[in-house]
Image (spheres, coloured by chain):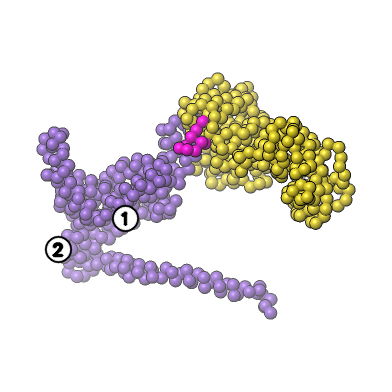
Chain colours: A purple, B yellow
Amino acid sequence: MSLSSEHINEASLRRLNRQERYKLFGLTLPYLVLVTALIIIPIGWLFYMSFIGRDGTLSLENYTRMLDSKAYMRIFITTFKISILTTLICAMLGYPLTYFMSQLPKKWAGLCMIGVLIPFWTSLLVRTYAWLVLLQKKGIVNTILVDLELISAPIKFVHNTSGTLIGMAHIMLPFLILPLYANMRTIDKDCVRAAASLGATPARAFWTVFFPLSIPGLLAGLLIVFVLCLGFYVTPAILGGGRVIMAAMKISSNIELYFSWGAASALGVVLLVSTLIILFLASKLVSMDQISGKS
Amino acid sequence: MTLNALNISIKDITKKYDDFHALKDINLEVTSGEFLTLLGPSGSGKTTLLMVLAGFTSPDYGSVKFGDEEVVLKPPHLRDIGMVFQNYALFPHMNVEQNVGYPQKLRGVSTQLLKDTVNEALATVKLDGLGHRNVDELSGGQKQRVALARAIVFKPKILLMDEPLSALDKKLREEMQIELRHLHDSLNMTTVYVTHDQKEALTMSDRIAVINHGSLMQLGTPNEIYNSPNNAFIADFIGESSLIPVSVKDNKAYLKKSEIFVNHSVEKNGDHLLVVRPEKLFISEEKEKNTNLFFGYVSESIFQGESQLLVLRLDPEVFGEQSLQMRIANGSDLKGKIPTVGDKISIGLRMSDSFIVEKSDVSQ
């Protein structure tokens, strides 16, 4: 029945496999349509607009202005400075906490995790205004510090860099903790025990075994926090009080105040490209699986 | 080897987790240079005891001495023991050489000595030349060897092993059992080995400590543990056996009404179990002297390669509703042929191979 060159059922089985692949591809279709409509086309539009000058013709003026203007330079420096500082604060607060959670029995770690997640699920705006209330001149923090006579006059916590950092670190912390925790849970406790049995003091075992094994999770967390900080708008806008201008805020003011879509688009493109460059460099250091939370 | 192994003496070690007695007053002497196996089912406490020796679990009370030195209060990193973990616990961010060199580096030995000892340890476990491999490039058996090399590179006087072969396939496991035993003999370390595999324990050990429900049930050579288990749990757990309920009256054991001859004196009246090892039974046409004779019919006959397994339903009129397992080695010289299902046969068990144990609650 079968042709000499064809094995039994070969063609039908091949067709079956092909159909299976099409079905799987079909599952991704809604997402592909969405991405194309909402991301790829708008970004293309963004690129296009960034090359439109004030007179409506194609020009590079939006970019040259950025290079020439000191104000833009300052905004980029502020953006990177705030992002780096926030990331470092998150690392210093988050690493010890996550380590602690990873050593707890699962039940207790779960409770701690709820403590991390509840603020994470609370509205960004609510938390930001809450900090404003807490940290303002006559807020609860200053009142307590003055009443305890630790300080003689209220400290200016908000409407400046410190307020921005406090608020951003608080909001970003879960983004560091979640991938780091996922990573730390996969570190074999026996490895640390093995180090101890081989003669390593607890500190030595931590630095030579646990810490190196947690680096992928830490890098993933740092990267997410840093990238999110670069484009952050709400919290620096409210807690910075107009004194801390980050790139996203400048984009917004370009549009709202100056109706300068070209300038805003160019800034957006620069922010997007620098974020992509950072992601690319980071992907050389840490696998993307780690960033998406797997390990 | 100029080093002397250390003896371990364990006294009254007890550990409770809430209501659960993980270890109950364990007393155990491990002589220097001995290969001692802690054998028990999972949850028996054997691993807890090993962790107490290693210092990762602290007991509620009791004493552990290495040589003359009390170590129960010492943290693990000061105990100077080699330890091999169940899943190897190799450091994934280091290559083979760095793994094996790790304890030497901690001890601050010179670069040259570090290199020499690492190479020596790798040669001992037959991994010469693989020093630059990454850990994830190794097979299970090779990982096991690296873990072993890392545990012996600093020449500890005591080596602890927690089910080190359980992740390997059967054939490799059996090879490694013999190799580990040879290694133990050449290194002169006191070895405490944890396993739930009774055959592994019999193969490797000088002595076996059988542990169940946190208690030491019996301590003895493999021969003693197999041939004269002191309770029903061990008789059942070690090797194959059929346990036949017998009753003791006036220093004699009876199965229903027929007397069973046993190789030891019986004092306690009441319910006991006759332990019948399948390989000790033989086909016997008539009653011989000093032999227990059973008869019935074959209900199962299974070819298993090295032997034929028969299940015998004993004659209920004489013995009650009982069945016995019997093994006939492949190639054994049988007068007739191997019985098949339904055959009526009679089988003998020599008095010297017959013993009874008390029927206890601990059997699982």
- Name which quarter of the figure residue B3 lies in: top right
Residue B16, magenta (yes or no): yes
Mark found first going from the N terminus, 2 or 1: 2
* Residue A258: assigned label: 2
Which element type, helix, strand or loop, lies under badge 2? loop
**Quarter of the image containing the N terminus of chain B?**
top right
Residue A214, magenta (yes or no): no
- How many neighbours does mark 1 have within 10 angstroms: few (below 14), some (14-19), or many (20 or more)? some
Which element type, helix, strand or loop, lies under badge 1? helix
Front residue of B49/A145: it is: B49
The residue segment tinted magenta is: B14-22
In this view, the residue farthest toward the bottom is A1
Query: Is A21 displayed left or right of A157 in the figure?
Result: right
Is residue B84 something that shows in the picture? no
Mark 1, residue position = A275
- Residue displayed at 44% across by 35% down: A205
- Residue displayed at 64% across by 32% down: B218
Badge 2 sits on which subunit?
Answer: A
Cα distance, mark 2 to mark 1?
A: 25 Å
Front residue of A75/B259: it is: B259
